[in-house]
Image (cartoon, grey):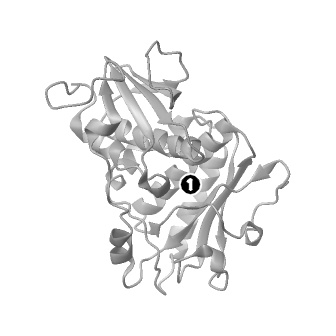
Amino acid sequence: MAETSEIDFASLEPTLLDRISTRTYGTVYPTADQVTAINTFIAKINSMNAPYNKPCKFALQMEDFSSFRTFGFITGSKYWIFGVTGKNDRNSDLSYGYLMHLIILECTRLGLKTVWLGGTFTTSVFTAIQYNSSTDYIPCVSPVGNSGNGSELISKMAGSRKRKELSEIIYIGNAETKYSKENAPEKFTLKILEEIRFAPSASNKQEWRIVISENKMHFFGIKGSWTALDMGICTAQAQVALAGNKVEGKFEIEKPEIGVPGDWEYFITFTATN
């Protein structure tokens, strides 16, 4: 499989604060060049060795789903991103969130709009990938296109730009000492942490918690039905933020000796090497 280094993470960093959830799409569809760029990026993603090391397969499908009520407030989109991964497997959900978020960020870089859709939707309409529904499934999908009138307003009304304060999700040294200006780490700058903070999550709950210890960021999540997918998204957001701010290092599964609340679970650690 391709190494993660084949993806230019740093080129995606400017998109981290630009991405918004868009539910209304216009009649100007992605150009042929944009479609080619998305498909080229997806081809890289489909052969990529993600930190959680589980295979996923993604595709861009052109389809009008306006007649399907299960797609909620989505109107006007003709292009959709979706993927397939293993059912009932934590690391498969982690990989899916990580890889799909990179595709979402690439679409943002191309000037296109997206929105994560999970839960109840009609999976049978996604036919660009053949898969065994007894072992695999489609966790989330996203329309992709240009915004129509009112999309930004709907996004803001839905609270898509609201985020927890850094002191609610970042801890220094242990799971009790909350982030503050006084204990802010030098290596992991405020800009990096702000970019991570704006990662999307299910209902914007931001269930991730990060404990920073010297040159390490330990990623935990509050246990829940969407936590694994959200933690995959958060990992991708962090990877791009770190690369874009010239912090080198790697993600690995460790066993950090950090006492945490009972509803936290450990996921992965980033170790900076420069």
The spot of residue 175 in percent (x, y) is 36, 23
- The amino acid marked with disc number 1 is Phe
Name above or below for residue 133 compared with residue 70: above
Q: Nearer the viewer, residue 256 or 216?
A: 256
Q: Nearer the viewer, residue 247 or 261?
A: 261
Circle 1 — which element? helix
The spot of residue 214 in percent (x, y) is 31, 17
Looking at the image, which residue is at 31% across and 55% down?
17
Q: Quadrant of residue 42?
A: bottom right
Looking at the image, which residue is at 51% across and 27% down?
268
Total number of numbered discs in the rendering? 1
Image quadrant in which the N terminus is located: top right
Image quadrant in which the C terminus is located: top left
The reply to whether residue 8 is visible in this rendering is: no
Q: Residue furthest top?
A: 257
Q: Nearer the viewer, residue 63 or 218?
A: 218
Q: Quadrant of residue 218?
A: top left
The reply to whether residue 204 is visible in this rendering is: yes
Looking at the image, which residue is at 49% across and 65% down?
115
- Label 1: how many Cα within 10 Å (few below 14, some 14–19, many 20+): some
- The residue identified by callout 1 is 41
The spot of residue 23 in percent (x, y) is 47, 74
The spot of residue 85 in percent (x, y) is 72, 48
Name above or below for residue 199 compared with residue 265: below
Name above or below for residue 226 compared with residue 156: above
Name above or below for residue 169 compared with residue 230: above
Q: Is residue 77 left or right of residue 179?
A: right
Q: Is residue 242 left or right of residue 138?
A: left
Q: Residue furthest front?
A: 262
